Image (cartoon, rainbow, N blue to C red):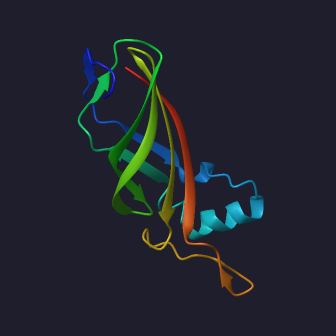
Amino acid sequence: AGPETTARWGSQITMRAPVESFDSGNNNRDAHMKEITETARYPHVEFKNLCDSCATPTSFPTTVDKTIKAELTFHSVKKTLEVPVKLTYESPSRIRAVAHLSVSLDEFKIERPSLLFAKVDDELKLDVDVVLKQ
């Protein structure tokens, strides 16, 4: 059983991040990935939750593990994903959301670059840590 509810967050949440801000810790790799992902043509990745509300607990802070349905748009391709998220309700008007997910470059029609004739891994790991304020 989850925490009791007193209110609901009913807005759809959309987040946009510039592809230019991606950082793997390797400048050469990042420059090549930005070229491959065509940052000038597709400058943003967009994440949109598809659930209509999140229950607000009666005591704070409270942490809840939840799986949300979300739409990820990357390189002009939209995919619906099931994303496990850890929600920390810091107050009635502030939630911290932390998620770790992997996406396939092939599924988003991004040609994987090669290094010495070997293509890079298809899996792109994303770590999300955001604070939502009402």
Say how many tags the image has: 0
Q: In which quarter of the image is residue 94?
A: top left
Task: Check the image and report above or below for 72 versus 49.
Answer: below
- Going by the image, does 88 lie left or right of 33? left
Q: Which of 132 and 31 is in front in this view?
A: 132
Determine the residue positioned at 36% across, 55% down: 81
- Residue 68 coordinates in the image, percent (x, y): 34, 44
- Residue 45 coordinates in the image, percent (x, y): 46, 52
User: For the N terminus, which image quadrant?
Assistant: top left
User: For the C terminus, which image quadrant?
Assistant: top left
Q: Nearer the viewer, residue 42 or 53?
A: 53
Q: Which of 84 and 72 is in front in this view?
A: 84
- Residue 18 coordinates in the image, percent (x, y): 53, 48
Determine the residue positioned at 47% across, 60% down: 42
- Going by the image, does 39 lie left or right of 56? right
Q: Which of 19 and 59 is in front in this view?
A: 59
- Residue 16 coordinates in the image, percent (x, y): 45, 44
